[in-house]
Structures are given as structure tokens and as C-alpha cells.
Image (tube, rainbow, N blue to C red):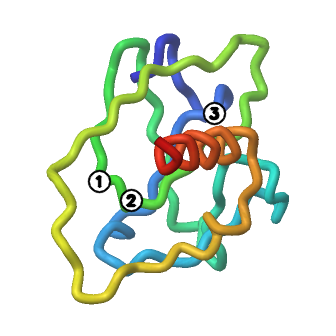
Amino acid sequence: MPLSGATVESGCLHFIPGSHLSEVIPHQPIGGDPRVHGLEAIDVDASKAVAISLEEGSVTVHHNRTLHYAGPNSTQQQRRAYIMMCGKPAAPRQTPRQFPWKEVQSTERSKRAERARNQGENK
């Protein structure tokens, strides 16, 4: 939910319709930099993306596997949004999925998470 209007100029979300129906595609840290928290999908045809402008307080609801991105903010106004994620518990899989792009990330956030996991194991 944008806390101020989200336009193409201010970096509204762009979605690739139907992308949630595909398997998870490879990702990498933005620009290939493992210190960056954000991810980018590899080899995606962004020409299929649809920009969704929203008024302040409007919402978009989409599947968590829908490919999406926010464009650059070329305005003087800050881009702020309230983001909420929800879903049902994951169903067990016969073969676990692998996300190698997560293994190469070395962000401050991932380091904090690793320290928290290690502290929990040492109790």
C-alpha cells in the first residue's frame, strides 16, 4: 500500500502477468553484488511487465511468486509503502528446492540471521 501516490515516475510496481504459474527462476543479488539484500531475476523479458500506478492508500494483492519490481523514483518525493505478506503454511516437498542465490548473499541482514541461528543452536 503506497503511503503516497505511486506513479511510474515515483517508482510504482511493475508485474509480469502469469509469472506466478512458472517454476522459480534463478535470481542473483542486484548487480551481482552479494552485499546487496535485494534480488533480481535472471533472463526475464521485462517488456512483458505492466506498470501499476496506485493512489495513496490503494493496495495491490499478488501471489508471492509473481515477478515484480519497483522502478526508479525520479521525483523529489520519498517513496514509502506499507507491505504485508501472508500465506498458508508450506506443504512438504518430495525434493527440497534449492536457492543458490541466497547462499552467496553476504548482507548485514543475512549475517544477523546467521548469528541468531548459531545462538539458538548453542543454547
Query: Which amino acid type is shown beneath numbered disc 1?
Result: His
Who's the residue at 76% across and 54% down the image?
A: 106
Who's the residue at 57% across and 17% down the image?
A: 80
**Are dots 1 and 2 in contact, CB under 8 Å?**
yes
Image vertical order of residue 5 relative to residue 115, above or below: above
How crowded is the residue under tag 2: few (<14 C-alpha within 10 Å), some, or many (20+)?
some
Residue 58, image x, y percentages: 33, 20
Residue 77, image x, y percentages: 71, 11
**Looking at the image, is mark 2 or mark 3 earlier in the sequence?**
3
Tag 2 residue: 66
Tag 3 residue: 11
Instruction: Give the alpha-carbon distance from disc 1 to disc 2, as whole Å.
Output: 5 Å
Residue depth check, mark 2 versus mark 3: number of the one nearer the observer = 2
Residue 67, image x, y percentages: 46, 60
Horizontal relation, residue 98 to residue 104: left or right = left
Instruction: Give the alpha-carbon distance from disc 2 to disc 3, as whole Å.
Output: 18 Å
Query: Which amino acid type is shown beneath numbered disc 3?
Result: Gly
Residue 5, image x, y percentages: 51, 16
Residue depth check, mark 3 versus mark 1: number of the one nearer the observer = 1
Horizontal relation, residue 43 to residue 14: left or right = right
Who's the residue at 16% across and 68% down the image?
A: 91
Who's the residue at 58% across and 77% down the image?
A: 26
Instruction: Give the alpha-carbon distance from disc 3 to disc 1, as whole Å.
Output: 20 Å
Secondary structure beneath label 2: loop
Tag 1 residue: 63
How crowded is the residue under tag 1: few (<14 C-alpha within 10 Å), some, or many (20+)?
few
